Amino acid sequence: MPRTWQRRRLLAVLAAAPLALAACGGSGGGNGGGSPSSQPKTLKLWHYEGPTSAMGVAWNQAIKVFQQEHPGVTVKFEEKGFEQIQQTAQMVLNSDGGPDIMEYNKGNATAGLLSSQGLLTDLTAEATKRGWDKKLNTGLQTTAKYDAKGVMGSGKWFGVPNYAEFVEVYYNKDMFAKYGLQVPKTLADFESVMAAFKSKGVTPLAVGGAEYPAQQIVYELALSKADRDWVNAYQTYTKKVDFKGPEWTSGAQTFADWVKKGFISKDSTSIKAEDMGVSFENAKYPIMISGSWWYGRFTQEIKKFQWDTFLFPGNTLAPGSSGNLWVVPKNSKAKQLAYDFIDITMRPEIQDLLGNNGGVPVAADPAKITDPKNKKLIEDYNQLASSDGLAFYPDWPAPGYYDVLVAQTQNLIRSGSVSKFLSGIEGPYDQNLAKVKG
């Protein structure tokens, strides 16, 4: 899903020249077959994870292992921005200037769209040969596979995730203790906690309405009235979704009520995800509903108060899925090397490293995760995953739907009009549905 706190910093990195992490050998062509002398000498790798994030730490180690095992191959790593790749991937992958392997967003609107356009390599044979299909459970494979129309959940492998993520509730334990508040067990309890903060003059929720966080809260609230059939219908078009039904209506109405009650500031329409996270780090707000991708950063950066997390009260479903995907562009000149790199990121030692740095690994040894906070994160994820509780993200169904949801959620914050919100998200969804079914 849209990510995250790294964006602002990464944008400053975009102008930097590619970093050659090894300097043995020159550029090469082909797809990795043939004699050693004819094999590619360069692996161009793009991703958008910060170097101190769990994925950044783990993948940097994976690059080192790759170099040790592929002497004479240069890894040309370029750190990109999430939105940069989101906006330019189609154009870049249609050219000869793209990478040999890159991190890319999952879902119908992104990896599904590119796969349907023939821009990604079919990884099905490699997934079987290298055992990735055994390491990833059925739920995690949902975002790896796409059919001919780019709809996730079936068909061929066009990506490989090696971490997972989900949305939960971060809270400032010191502020809860100051006002004698307990971790809520139900949605009603949660609203009582927020009302208690508001009565003390504290706006309880840190929200970023200018980007993905606000729409994820609306979706989280919709999920409180949803079941798996509704999620499948919404995400994979198994049947018609009623946007005036109890799920979206309740989600939008509750969200609008939270704004009206002062649980969410109207100023949040202009707040980006990064600023939301910083405001929680600075204890401006006691609660933040967002993804596990913040976990590692908060572990490192929050030193002035105690914090913890809990799953959204009362919900059996939550936004979440596999993490972003490793994809191999169709025009990759070093496909075998790309497969080798993916394989390294799936190894236990890399997965353990990811888990011990605040990430959610998909193939780690639980006994090797030593940090108590990281154990708690993985336990929460396992609770959701084991009960089939990962409900993906609200913007996945259609290309461009992310921007639709951002705009409509901003309007919901400003106007409180639930009917306009529902109509605003229904139209673009149905237009895409007609294309998929047409």
Image: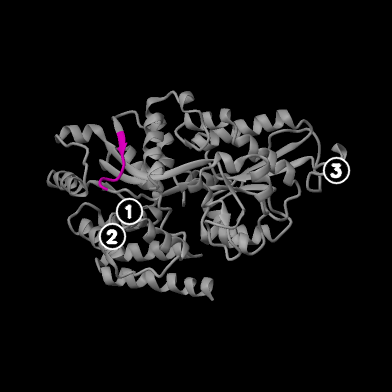
Q: Are marks 3 and 1 in contact (CB under 8 Å)?
A: no
Contact between marks 2 and 3 (CB within 8 A): the answer is no
Residue picked out by circle 1: 220
Instruction: State the separation of the CA atoms marked 2 and 3.
Output: 56 Å
Residue for point 73% across, 30% down:
69
Numbered disc 3: secondary structure: loop
Q: Is residue 94 visible?
A: yes
Viewer-side residue, 429 vs 91: 429
Q: Image quadrant of residue 372?
A: top left
> Where does residue 247 sit, x and y in percent of width and height?
30, 62
Circle 2 residue: 251
Residue pointed to by mark 3: 34
Position of 343 with respect to 8 (left or right) is: right
3D distance between C-alphas at marks 3 and 1: 51 Å
Gap between marks 1 and 2 measured at Cα: 7 Å
Q: Find residue 436 and report its horizontal and vertical position in percent.
A: 53, 71
Residue 427 located left or right of residue 97? left
Residue at 31% from the left image edge and 42% from the top image edge = 311
Determine the residue positioned at 36% across, 46% down: 290
Disc on the earlier residue, 3 or 1? 3
Identify which residue, 373 or 90, lies in the foreground. Answer: 373
Quarter location, residue 416: bottom left
Q: Which residue is more in the foreground, 3 or 381?
A: 381
| Mark 1 in CB contact with mark 2 (< 8 angstroms) | yes
Give amino acid for label 2: Gly
The local secondary structure at tag 1 comes to: helix
The boundaries of the magenta stretch are 308-314
